[in-house]
């Protein structure tokens, strides 16, 4: 049976030669920021992975084809595309079957990465339990994906617009290891620290890679979440972000924003309320995560 994805030439060569590869999502391109800022950021993230010694594999569905790794022409086309679907586990196959174009979230990027044999994925922040989920039941599919798909995900924690305590409770229930790099508190996306104690701490990419490999050897399903603190130079402290997030959340409630539209709305509203600082922080943390993911991928290849 033909593989249901198409690797880029660079990704295919790297995988065949057992060189490190890092998966990258595409919703940051289509739903995270406007053109041409999105294209500039996507290129910067890919170059950061290359500079750190790995091959980037940006994942997306273009005209019904699941691409694991995009050429620069494809990247530019996606950055300018209109009406791009936001794909998670539920709609990835449907988009492909209908010949559509869609950007992958954390969950669908993990699925595609595992399918292609890529073990490490760098993103900004994972989805999680939304505030008010006890009424709305709004919980991201990212959490279940972490529990079942064996990919190490490097993020700056869960997005700070979420209920972080409930998100951590669900991850604990699902048996997902949450590893803070080099500190005892959980990072909170735009902020390097929070009041939440990290369940696990590791201080090197080598330790993280070893834990990934041992989970496979122990036949434990699922991946692991690496919570990589945003660099202090670009962070917005949690105390400063809290009232901004609260205002954006109230605005979403008043406008009746629900479902998949909540996160893009909140990120755009927070951008406006912070005068663009949240976007600068977002770009800084994604680049930082890409570097760490490349280091982990190198360790996995070296110790395979």
Image (cartoon, rainbow, N blue to C red):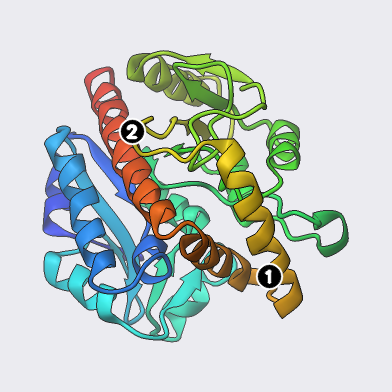
Between 232 and 56, the residue placed more toward the observer is: 232
Q: Is residue 159 left or right of residue 172?
A: left
Residue 177, position in %: x, y? 59, 27
**What residue is shown at x 48% (from left), y 42% (from top)?**
190
The image quarter in which residue 70 lies: bottom left
| 196 or 214: nearer the viewer | 196
- Residue at 68 percent across and 40 percent down: it is 164
| Residue 257 placement (x, y as % from top left) | 68, 75
Q: What residue does disc 2 label?
A: 233
**Local SS, label 1:** helix
Q: Nearer the viewer, residue 83 or 208?
A: 83
Q: Quadrant of the C terminus?
A: top left
Q: Are marks 1 and 2 in contact (CB under 8 Å)?
A: no
Residue located beneath label 1 in the image: 251
Q: Which mark is residue 52?
A: none
| Drawn side of residue 171 relative to residue 263, left or right | right
Q: Count residues near mark 2 (Cα–Cα under 10 Å), then give few for <14, some for 14-19, many for 20+.
A: few
Percent coordinates x, y for residue 67 in the rendering: 29, 65
Is the residue 292 above or below the residue 57 in the image? Answer: above
Which residue, as the protein is rendered here, is positioned at the far right? 135
For mark 1, does the 10 Å Cα neighbourhood hold few (<14), some (14 to 19), or many (20 or more) residues? some
Q: Secondary structure at mark 2?
A: loop
Find residue 46 and report its horizontal and vertical position in percent: 20, 50
Mark 2 or mark 1, which is nearer the start of the sequence? 2
Q: Work out whether residue 282 or residue 238 is closer to the camera in this orientation and state it.
A: 238
Residue 38: image quadrant is: bottom left
Q: Quadrant of residue 40?
A: bottom left
**In the displayed structure, does residue 285 sit left or right of residue 41?**
right
* 16 w.r.t. 135: above or below: above
Q: CA distance from mark 1 to mark 2?
A: 29 Å
Identify the residue shown where x is 76% and y is 41%. Answer: 166
Q: Image quadrant for the N terminus?
A: bottom left
């Amino acid at each position: 049976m033909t593989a249901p994805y198409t690797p880029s030439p660079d990704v295919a060569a790297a995988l065949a030669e057992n060189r490190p590869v890092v998966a990258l999502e595409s919703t940051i391109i289509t739903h995270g920021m406007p053109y041409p800022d999105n294209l500039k950021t996507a290129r910067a993230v890919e170059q950061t992975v290359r500079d750190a010694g790995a091959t980037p594999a940006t994942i997306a569905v273009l005209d019904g084809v699941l691409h694991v790794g995009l050429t620069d022409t494809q990247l530019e086309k996606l950055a300018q595309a209109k009406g791009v679907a936001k794909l998670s586990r539920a709609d990835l196959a449907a988009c492909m079957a209908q010949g559509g174009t869609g950007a992958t979230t954390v969950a669908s990027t993990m699925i595609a990465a595992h399918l292609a044999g890529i073990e490490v994925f760098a993103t900004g922040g994972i989805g999680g339990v939304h505030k008010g989920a006890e009424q709305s039941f709004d919980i991201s599919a990212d959490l279940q994906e972490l529990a079942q798909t064996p990919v190490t995900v490097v993020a700056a924690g869960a997005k700070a617009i979420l209920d972080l305590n409930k998100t951590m409770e669900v991850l604990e229930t699902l048996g997902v290891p949450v590893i803070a790099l080099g500190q005892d508190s959980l990072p909170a996306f735009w902020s390097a620290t929070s009041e939440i104690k990290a369940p696990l701490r590791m201080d090197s990419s080598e330790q993280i890679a070893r834990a990934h490999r041992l989970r496979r050897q122990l036949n434990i399903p699922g991946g692991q979440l690496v919570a990589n603190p945003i660099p202090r130079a670009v962070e917005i402290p949690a105390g400063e972000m809290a009232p901004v997030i609260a205002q954006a959340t109230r605005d979403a409630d008043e406008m009746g924003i629900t479902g998949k539209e909540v996160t893009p709305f909140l990120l755009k509203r927070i951008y406006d309320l912070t005068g663009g600082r949240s976007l600068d922080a977002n770009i800084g943390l994604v680049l930082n995560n890409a570097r760490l993911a490349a280091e982990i991928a190198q360790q996995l290849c070296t110790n395979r």
